[in-house]
Amino acid sequence: MEKIPELTTLCYIEHDGKYLMLHRVKKDKDINKDKYIGVGGHFEYGESPDECLLREVKEETGLTLTSYRARGIITFVYGQDVTEYMHLYTADRYTGDMLDCDEGELVWIEKEKVCNLPIWEGDKVFFRLLEEDKGFFSVKLVYSEDDELTETQIHQS
């Protein structure tokens, strides 16, 4: 059986030195259960990364992004069965009012406290690259089926 990689977007919306984070506490069967992540999701057929980003942010938060930036591509390899190519963005302007999210609780977290939260170990790698702001990057993160980060590769342009 041919394995097809997952295509996703993820965005960290910035405001007053904080990131908008999604605390994934509402779904029982969720690989991100109890972790804090950004907002985003899976591509729909025919969507560009930007179209997916804008749709997913609107669906999960109620916000319409008016200023955003592509920051990198993250390749996740999880065990033998999952490969995901995630387009990572940050955003600093938006319109609209925040809604309740059916996937978790939306909370503003001070940037310097994010890495102290329950997040994936590999997320700390790209948070560091976001803070260094040295341009577009590609990161490969390999996880065991026990959620252990076993390999990291970083390429910056």
Image (tube, rainbow, N blue to C red):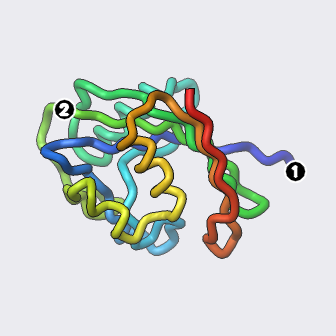
State the separation of the CA atoms marked 1 and 2: 42 Å
Mark 1 crowdedness (10 Å alpha carbons): few <14, some 14-19, many ≥20: few
11 sits left or right of 147 in the view: left
Residue 7 in view, yes or no: no
Observer-side mark, 1 or 2, equals 2
Return the residue at label 1: 1
Mark 2 crowdedness (10 Å alpha carbons): few <14, some 14-19, many ≥20: some
Tell me the amino acid under the disc marked 2.
Tyr
Residue 47 locus on image (x, y percent): 51, 26
Residue 53 in view, yes or no: yes
Q: Is mark 1 on a helix, strand or loop?
A: loop
**Viewer-closest of 101 and 33:** 33
**Viewer-closest of 125 and 65:** 125
Q: Residue at 69% of width from left, 54% of height from top?
A: 77
Q: Is mark 2 on a helix, strand or loop?
A: strand
Residue 13 locus on image (x, y percent): 27, 42
